[in-house]
Amino acid sequence: MSSLNIVGPDHPMLHTLVRPITPEQINHPVTQALIFEMQELLRKTSSVGLAINQVGLDYPPMIVIEDLQAYIDQVPMERRRPFLRDTPIPFHALFSPTMEPRGNDVCHAFVSCASVPGVWGAVPYHWSIRVTAYNEEGKEILINAIGWYSLILQHEINHLEGIVFTDIALKGSVMPSRTFFAKQWGLKTSSEIARAFGAKEEV
Ligand SMILES: [Zn+2]
């Protein structure tokens, strides 16, 4: 049973930069045990991603990601299609991930976060990114990601940088969940979101 808990939106660790790790430390039994605890918490909170800051820690610099078919099936096709969210993402943990955009395409997407319950906001994410990180075995890996997976990676890597989505959401776009669902913001395209909140469609 995981002893970890999500900290609230006012917790200082959400705005704290995480500390670095070495490949040897990733292979330490304590770090390996923490991977499984984070996986348990990810499933307990029905989240697709979590970062270590969200449990009130600034070490190790870890994110965990998993998208299950059961989650995908609950989301209407019109909301999944623009992000190419069509196949599950197997569970994996990444350490010390760094990212850079590939190309100038921006994807404006409404997101929520277990650390800031009850609100949604539109964030201008890069459509395509390249991530370098260590995997669970401490090996350096390169990931090219587009669409949904790219959005999750950016949201979680932002956490490790001390950035919560409400910090970078388009001005005026953060709203209570009931408004988000009542107005069907989840069905709007990236262009419609950009227009509604006065954002550019390229960076
Ligand atoms: Zn989050």
Image (spheres, rainbow, N blue to C red):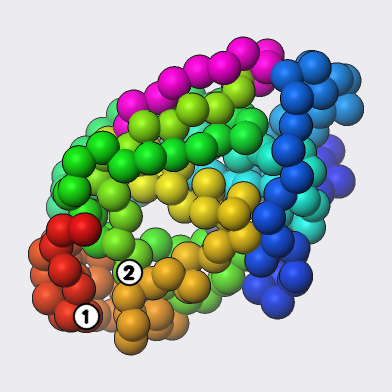
In the rendered image, residue 146, in percent from the top left (x then y), is placed at: 27, 36
| Amino acid marked by disc 1 | Phe
Residue position marked by numbered label 2 in the rendering: 122
Q: Does residue 178 show up?
A: no
For the residue pair 73 and 187, the one nearer the viewer reads as 187
Residue position marked by numbered label 1 in the rendering: 197
**Residue at figure coordinates x 50%, y 18% from the top left:** 141
172 to 83, vertically: above or below: below
| Amino acid marked by disc 2 | Ala
State the mark number for residue 111. none
**Residue at figure coordinates x 25%, y 61% from the top left:** 108
In screen coordinates, is 103 left or right of 179? left
**Residue at figure coordinates x 57%, y 71% from the top left:** 117
Q: Does residue 100 show up?
A: yes
Image quadrant of ligand 1? bottom right
Callout 2 crowding tier (Cα within 10 Å): few <14, some 14–19, many ≥20: many
Q: Secondary structure at mark 2?
A: strand
In the rendered image, residue 60, in percent from the top left (x then y), is placed at: 76, 38
Contact check, label 1 and label 2, Cβ < 8 Å: yes
Which of marks 2 and 1 precedes in the sequence?
2
Residue at mark 1 to residue at mark 2: CA–CA distance? 9 Å
In screen coordinates, is 134 left or right of 7? left
Q: Residue 86 lies in magenta, yes or no? A: no
**Residue at figure coordinates x 78%, y 58% from the top left:** 56
104 to 31, vertically: above or below: below
In the rendered image, residue 189, in percent from the top left (x then y), is placed at: 14, 61
Q: Which residues are magenta?
A: 136-145
